[in-house]
Amino acid sequence: MPVGRDIGAPVGVPARCASRSVRMPPRISLHRWDEIALEKITEMISRKIVSGEREMLAQIYLKRGALVPIHAHESEQMTYILQGALRFLVGGEEVTVREGEVLHIPSGMPHQAEALEDTLELDVFSPVRAEWVDAADEGNF
């Protein structure tokens, strides 16, 4: 049996075994932080967002003393501190995350954060935080 490649079918999968619907091939995209507009959430918190279909990357700037109020979301979250430090309250447990450290927050777990110093951090969310993609999302954490 000949092996073909349908659009979207894995290499080596017989064409007749691949999905019968025609799918567009995945597209890559390159993003440059310096070309993404800074979104001001509060006087103390700003962010830039890059989003794919199933995950989202956010660059967050927090001034010392900034407080992200307690909230929860469907998305699993990874927070990587590039500069500064954040004190989190996650599921009732306090943890301080500093430069070079990564905090994993499971889906649905209530959490809040306080900037102990001026902080630059990266958050990865999966699935995408749909409420952040919505342009009318002012002030939503």
Image (cartoon, rainbow, N blue to C red):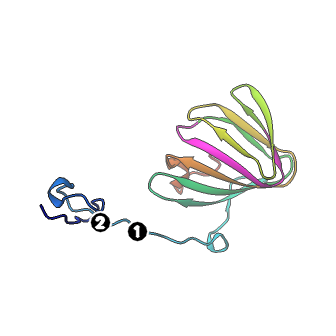
Q: What stretch is highlighted in magenta?
A: 73-87
Give the amino acid at mark 2.
Met
Q: Position of residue 112 (x, y in %)?
A: 72, 37
Q: Main secondary structure of the magenta part?
A: strand
Q: Does the magenta stretch include residue 86?
A: yes
Q: Does the magenta stretch include residue 80?
A: yes
Q: Which of 31 and 40 is in front in this view?
A: 31
Alpha-carbon span between mark 2 and mark 1: 9 Å
**Residue at image point 55% right, 54% down:** 56
Q: Are marks 2 and 1 in contact (CB under 8 Å)?
A: yes
Residue that badge 1 annotates: 27
Q: Which of 86 and 19 is in front in this view?
A: 19
Q: Quadrant of residue 50?
A: bottom right
Specify whether 54 is left or right of 100.
left
Do we see residue 91 in this rendering?
yes
Q: Nearer the viewer, residue 25 or 141?
A: 25
Find the residue positioned furthest to the front: 1
Q: Where is residue 133 in the image (x, y as percent from the top left)?
A: 52, 55
Q: In which quarter of the image is the N terminus?
A: bottom left
Give the amino acid at mark 1.
Arg
Q: Residue 24 carries which label?
A: 2
**Above-or-below relation of 80 to 93:** below
Q: Position of residue 62 (x, y in %)?
A: 78, 53
Q: In which quarter of the image is the C terminus?
A: top right
Q: Position of residue 69 (x, y in %)?
A: 71, 38
Specify whether 119 is left or right of 107.
right
Do we see residue 141 in this rendering?
no
* Residue density around tag 2, few if under 14, some if 14–19, many if 20 or more, within 10 Å: few
* Residue density around tag 1, few if under 14, some if 14–19, many if 20 or more, within 10 Å: few
